[in-house]
Image (cartoon, rainbow, N blue to C red):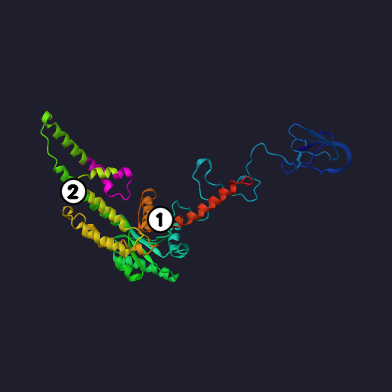
Amino acid sequence: MSKTFPNRAANVAAATGQHDPARAVDTAPAAMPWAAARSMSSGMLGPTVPWTWLSLSPAIAASAVAVASPVTFPTWLCPTVATPAVSSNGPSGSSSKMACRTRLQVGTCGAITASSSLGPPSRTGSRRLGKKKVDSISTTYLDEALADFSGYLAIDEVYDGPFCILSVVDNRRYNRLAFRVLEHDPTQKDVLAFLTKFKGQLDKRRLSVLGITTDGSSLYPKVLKKLWPAARHQICEFPVLKEINKAVLHARAKLRKEMAAQIPKPPRGRPRQEHQGQAGLIARQKRRVAELFEHRHLFVRHHLSAAEQKQLQKLTRGRPELRTLRKIMEEVYRLFDRRCKTQTALKKLQRLRSRVRRFKKLGKSLDKLKSPMLEKALEFLDDKLLGATSNAVERANRRFRKAQHSIYSVRTKEHLEQRLALDMHREQRAPKRQRTMKVLHNARSKPDSLH
């Protein structure tokens, strides 16, 4: 919006502003009294509504002067509120309106961009966060993880090339408590040093251990007996049952080979009319041997449906030794029933061992039933809270295996420690994050919500 003086006679010589200074002035202009010089102001009230305002203004006249610049009609800006049609940038570094000129920034027109930060540039994949998490494992993380400690532990190791990772997990809460990365195969000294340090953290918080579950490794029994002599030591039942299943399947394969060897070989060529019955018998025996291999899982499966039981009866018809193998597996599964105590299960095991000894055909196939590991796997029957398996620590090992293939490829001891620490903190925050998302979802789903 501008204000102009259309009357040229009242403005013989005009004083100019700083943007159009006069080059030479002989005499100063003299102020004149109020005259009937009309000034006109024009503007726009809206996109389509113009307006005009007339007012009296004092006329300013001057004597004859010699001005080097051409005579112009004076205009000046009036403050008003207006919406710019296009975006405008601020003054540049070389503008004359800047009080102090600044150096031009590097990076315009596709040139190399320079960092405006005073500190060193950040690196993608920096390990500072991982180092902090490693340091906080034995302090803030362990304080929160042991806030609801159950008293039952699960200990296991997992291998990654030349490295070995020892882990301790709460077997009831599924909270990972501690780990140690070794650059060699573990020994009893390594396990003792690792668990001694962890025991110190428990003693500092006045926590006691009631039961420990491990696999069948020989690294743990002596160490656990030394550190926690009053705690129950349970061997995970999965590896014990796995070995027994292998023994039963091996005995079944031995019997199947004997059945295949007893099948007579038919003569070459098309069978004659008088040998058709024998050819049919040979074909049925071969089919039975093939079905015995196809349905071999029926001999070791824990629970069988009605159709599977019928199929098993068909396979074991006329073969009492095959039926005995299935009964042996049923007796083994019955040992791990929590409705009985450890001493009762041990008596059942003793009767089962004496029964198996009578079957000379099985030979040494079922020697796994004589293993002392089977007796240690029945320790959980006297304690309802003691875990029969080390599934809690195996779950942590599976998380490590997944990260091993999808997250990183370069493996060092420091890198493994940082990755494990970050994953432990992420898993610890997961329940809180899920609760927060659930609360936000419920709040935003209400009809009167402002979100």
> In the rendered image, which residue does mark 1 sit on?
419
- Dot 1 lies on which element? helix
From the viewer's side, name the closer residue of 382 and 35.
382
* Amino acid under disc 2: Lys
Which corner quadrant of the image does residue 206 belong to? bottom left
Residue 73: x and y in percent read 77, 36
Residue 212: x and y in percent read 36, 64
In primary-sequence order, the first of circles 2 and 1 is: 2
Q: Is residue 436 magenta?
A: no
Please tell me which residue is depicted at 38% across the width and 68% down the height of the picture. 197
> In the rendered image, which residue does mark 2 sit on?
254
Q: Give the alpha-carbon distance from disc 2 to disc 1, as whole Å.
A: 48 Å
Quadrant occupied by the N terminus:
top right
For label 1, the crowd category at 10 Å Cα-Cα, with few meaning under 14, some 14 to 19 and many 20 or more, is many
Residue 180 seen in the figure = no
Judge left or right: residue 140 versus residue 14.
Answer: left
Please tell me which residue is depicted at 33% across the width and 61% down the height of the picture. 214
Please tell me which residue is depicted at 51% across the width and 52% down the height of the picture. 434
Residue 18: x and y in percent read 73, 44
From the viewer's side, name the closer residue of 230 and 2.
230
* Amino acid under disc 1: Arg
Q: Which residues are magenta?
A: 289-309
Residue 305: x and y in percent read 33, 45
